[in-house]
Image (cartoon, helix red, strand yellow):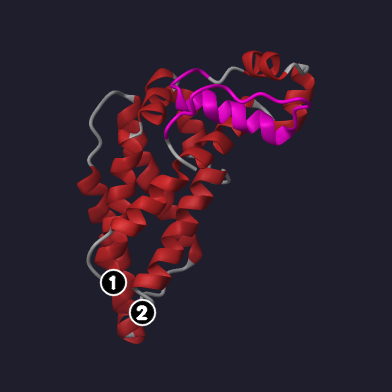
Amino acid sequence: MSSHPEAGPPSFRKPTAGDARTVATWLFRRGERVDMHTLATHLDIGRSTLYRWVGDREKLMDQVILASVGDIWDDARRDAVGGGVDRVLDATRRFMQGCIDFQPLATFARREPNLALRVLLDPDGLVTAALARNLSREVAAAAPEVAVPQRTFEVLALAATALLWAHVAASRDPDIDATIDIMRTVLSAHARVAESPGEEADRL
């Protein structure tokens, strides 16, 4: 999906749960606060129906952010340069910078930092799972010799997200380079284990 807001709010004859997520995403991309009351009013449904469809506001924002940043990862992956681990890290760097440059997400993090961090740092959330899955797939494609447990990708996804958005929420500039260096250290360690599993595994 494009990160650019549509020209006007979607309209529906008989709204569905999918329509609720569509309107919420449209509001988010305009930089507006995604309010459950406003959303229910626009769809002409009761709030109880809305909550039944999408869960609470935290769960809804998890879905909205995931829908809004998918194309940022696709662009980062397509434009990444280098090979092996370097390509994975370049894609990750581009993705992180793309998320920071995506104004609706940055606005949300600064306007509602507590909610934003709860959503973005939820280990069971959709956003975290998607980032871990994307990292896993990119490593498998660009550096198949690097054997990384899925749990490690999950931890890397959480660490990268925390280092990025905790700074943004506090209106400070995040240090993407430091985050990439941490990821490089972890992935390089697994690459060495793959090359000589005996001795390296004992040290790790």
Q: Position of residue 9 (x, y in %)?
A: 57, 22
Q: Which residue is mark 2?
A: 145
Q: Amino acid under label 1?
A: Gly
User: Where, by quadrant of the figure, is residue 109 drawn?
Assistant: top left
Which stretch did the figure color magenta?
4-33
Q: Which residue is painted at 55% across and 21% down in the image?
A: 34
Cα separation, mark 1 vs mark 2, equals: 9 Å
Report the label total. Answer: 2
Q: Position of residue 201 (x, y in %)?
A: 36, 78
Above or below, 131 relative to 46: below
The reply, left or right, for residue 41 in relation to residue 198 is right
> Front-most of 80 and 203?
80
Q: Which residue is painted at 45% across and 22% down in the image?
A: 30
Q: Which residue is mark 1?
A: 84
Magenta region includes residue 14? yes
User: Where, by quadrant of the figure, is residue 79 drawn?
Assistant: bottom left
Q: Amino acid under label 2?
A: Glu
